[in-house]
Amino acid sequence: MTDQPTVRPRIAAVVVTFNRLELLQRLVARLREVPGVDEILVVDNASTDGTGEWLAAQDGVRAHTLTENRGGAGGFHDGLAWAMDVGADLAWLMDDDGLPDADSLGTLLAHRGDFDFWGPVVVDEADPGRLVFPIRLPGGTRVVHRMADVAAAAPDGVIRDVVIPFNGVLVTRDLVDRIGLPREEFFIWGDDHEYRLRAERAGGRIGTIVDARVCHPSVGELGTPMMFGRTTYNHSPSDLKHYCMARNNLLNLRDYRGWPHALMFVAKTVWFYTFTRPRPARLALSARAMYAGLRGDFTGHRRFLR
């Protein structure tokens, strides 16, 4: 660990929310307890469940309500810009459904100076020994799902070059100045990964701090086995999520890994919905999403919004 800067940073917690008032209330209550948070900035994606009214009555919380739901990508785009506008040295980015431990920020700040983009592990609130978002260890293909495996892989308490974006992560002003804001047009799925890839390409120092923790509701098993268990596919029953995933993931692979990886993703999609989960309609949806992304059309997901 390098010597830490002596000047206390100005920290803005940035929360993006949409129609999850109870979870937002839980999170805001926790953020009020965390030492070192100078601003609590909430971007409301045009919620219809009373979120706006509740936020308007809160002291010490600043809220910005969007005119329409622009997804997590649009919310974090505006929220990170807002944090920079209010003079934050560090933005602490999170969705409304996570709950950082009260000491999570302090644990992360102990590594300030070592990283530009770093964050906690994200564990299942019902089973804290299980990761909600599995971690692919650097330098290989091994993916770990349990905290015991994470700890074993990080004897110094840090997994370098890995971060789970927008779930309690810290981003420095310097990195934002270098790489800009998240891609708001992605709407959901892949915007966080693209931001990490962009940071990596720019030489950003990235890491996960094993002793810092955010609890999160389970999202089920990410990655459905396919090709006789040799690989997995991010299948979702939601047409909205799948459309955005197919479109955005293809672009991320093309832009950051090259056409061979992008074409492998196309082949995986064809295999999955032909043999693993035969669904001709989903194949057609995938093709439309991918073609739209390659054309630079980021409007197709709107047909699935309610």
Image (cartoon, rainbow, N blue to C red):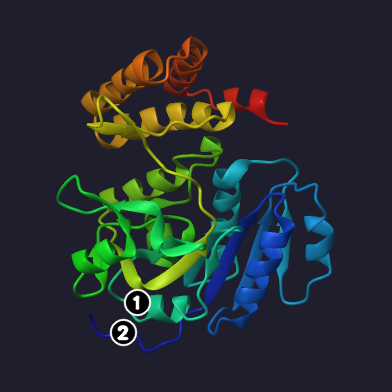
In terms of secondary structure, where does tag 2 sit? loop
Tag 2 and tag 1, C-beta contact below 8 Å: yes
Q: Quadrant of the C terminus?
A: top right
In terms of secondary structure, where does tag 1 sit? loop
Going 54% across and 85% down the picture, which residue do you hit? 35
Q: Quickly name the residue at label 1.
A: 112
Going 27% across and 48% down the picture, which residue do you hit? 201
Q: Crowdedness of circle 2 by 10 Å Cα count: few (<14), some, many (20+)?
A: few
Horizontal and vertical percent for residue 55? 78, 64
Q: Quickly name the residue at label 2.
A: 4
- Which quarter of the picture shows residue 162? bottom left
Horizontal and vertical percent for residue 126? 51, 62
Taking the view exactly as shown, the residue that stands out farthest to the bottom is 6
Q: Earlier in the sequence, mark 2 or mark 1?
A: 2
Horizontal and vertical percent for residue 229? 25, 31
Q: Crowdedness of circle 1 by 10 Å Cα count: few (<14), some, many (20+)?
A: many
Horizontal and vertical percent for residue 228? 24, 26
Name the residue nearer the viewer: 254 or 95.
95
Q: Amino acid at mark 1?
A: Arg
Up/down of 239 relative to 51, above or below: above
Left or right, 43 with respect to 124, comes to right
Taking the view exactly as shown, the residue that stands out farthest to the left is 139
Label number found at residue 214: none
* Alpha carbons under labels 2 and 1: distance apart: 6 Å
